[in-house]
Amino acid sequence: MNWVKGQDDTQSKTSPKFEKLVAQIKNNQSRNESYNLSKTLIAETKRDGEDKDLLQAYVITSGIAPDSLATKYCDSILNIAIKLKDQTAIGASYFSIAGRSMRVFDYKKAAEYFAISYDYYLSQKNTYWEKTNLLSIGRLKSLIGEDNAASNLFLEHYNYFKSNQITPDHKFSFNFAKVYIIYINSKLKKYKENETLIREVYTFFDQNKKYSFFKFHILLADGRNDFSLGNYNSALVKLENARKAIDLVDSQNLDNIDFYIAMCYWKMGNIDKAFPIFENIKKNFLKTKKTSLEFRPTFDFFTEYYKKNGTTEQQLASLNDLLEFDKYEKDVKSYVQLKLKDFDEKHKTEEEFLTEDEQRFGNWLSIAIISLSSIAVAYFVYKKVKTKTQNEKVEVSEAPTIATNFHEQQKTEEEKQNEISLDTGIDYSLYRPINKLTVDQILGSMKTFETSLGFLEPDLKLTALAQKFNTNEKYLSKVIKVNLGKTFNAYLTDLRFEYLDEKLKTDSQFKNQMIKEISSKLGFGSPEFFATAFKEKYGKSPKEYFEA
């Protein structure tokens, strides 16, 4: 639903001439029919020649297309969005690619692209998509075993949409968040909380038939919850209903449903029914070298089964399969953790800024209360001294002047530091609560960093650079934002491309290197990210640009 809805959040909108066809696509209950209609939309927008309309057509189609074809539509979104310089659409394309990668168990690509899309939405202040992204990143966190972190992200998403139920789609997102909270609660054994949530989600789908296509999600979550409780018969009924409700195009969810069906059969002792399902999951993994990180019990099943019923050769083969999965799991987990580290830093920084704002509000509220109390005291003092002699009144009237002069002399060092510096022209008040000395220190470190080409360090992170500057990531991020109007990633990328421009002017052979080598010399973490950033800046791929 989020991918289909993407068209509502890009900077451009579908032309009125295509609104009827778009409505047919959105409201159709058959994914295959919607996909065929979306291909018609692409053909018509291509004939019309408007890139903005073609962009929307690709956004819609990317969410409906079969897994094997979806990525090409996502790539088309990215290319057109870069051409149109539509930053929100660029973020949406990364989000779509990440989502599709999740569905085919490519968690490495999903982690990288979800982190990039979050950065885009953050820089564009697109709160709807920023919060929507948290749900996806939470799913990844859960898959790598960080269940408490995942729960916090799901709750943040939930609380945002609870307070922002502006449209029916917002209400859908609010209830969809409950599905993932149910899932994570069942892992954390918070079954009591799930009782209410499950009832609420079923009620939502019963009352909102246009979203019935997605009802299989609550059936799956409810089935998982029953499985976790040990209610295997009840879980089987719900999982079988989920399987009937799901469109076969949605391959990953179908695999998840089948896995839990097999788990129920195994726990109930019905090995004959569990075996073929687990066998299919195992074969797919050995063929593609990709599967859900949740599916490890599949391999435990075979080691246990062949230990009782198999030959020595079968026992060894099942152990080898288990070791291969463990190696795959370890590799994926470490990569995903690494790629989400940048997200963790940014998300932490945003949370700290919010906490800071709340603290400042609390401080100002306290000051206001104290001030009001002072005014009340002053009023009663005034009533007292009113009856005194004129001479005493003169003395009293001189007191405010003396007090004012004293107040001017006692200006705090922090207030002085936060005034505009006449020497540098810097408005230090913009950097509050960071004081003048710290701002100057960070700006000086940035200048040294730029002149010494420190930005060429491979895969440089905000936390690492803050440590080099003897400050924290929150302060460094704010100084960069106030001083340059950029995020940390944008600052780093711009410096690297400025260096590249100079290098191409002074070294004619530099462009003749492999793209991978150029990417590495510029400090980019991967050639793919370099190529994407390059195309966004120059409008061409590195190969096209260098060969021109």
Image (spheres, rainbow, N blue to C red):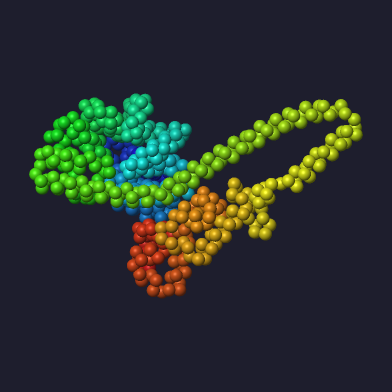
Occupied quadrant, residue 260 = top left
Q: Position of residue 347 (x, y in %)?
A: 45, 45
Q: Is residue 526 left or right of residue 376?
A: left
Q: Is residue 182 left or right of residue 382?
A: left
Say which of 4 and 331 sits in front: 331
Q: Is 140 drawn above or below residue 270 in the view shown?
A: below
- Quadrant (top left, top right, bottom left, bottom right) of the C terminus: bottom left
Can residue 511 be seen here? yes
The residue under the point 68% across, 49% down is 413
Number of on-image labels? 0
Occupied quadrant, residue 149 = top left
Q: Position of residue 188 (x, y in %)?
A: 34, 33
Occupied quadrant, residue 213 = top left
- Quadrant (top left, top right, bottom left, bottom right) of the N terminus: top left
Q: Is 104 drawn above or below residue 524 in the view shown?
A: above
The residue under the point 68% across, 57% down is 422
The residue under the point 80% across, 39% down is 400
Can residue 4 be seen here? no
Say which of 107 and 310 sits in front: 310
Q: Position of residue 52 (x, y in %)?
A: 40, 50
Q: Is residue 156 left or right of residue 194?
A: right
Q: Position of residue 4 (x, y in %)?
A: 35, 42
The residue under the point 21% across, 35% down is 263
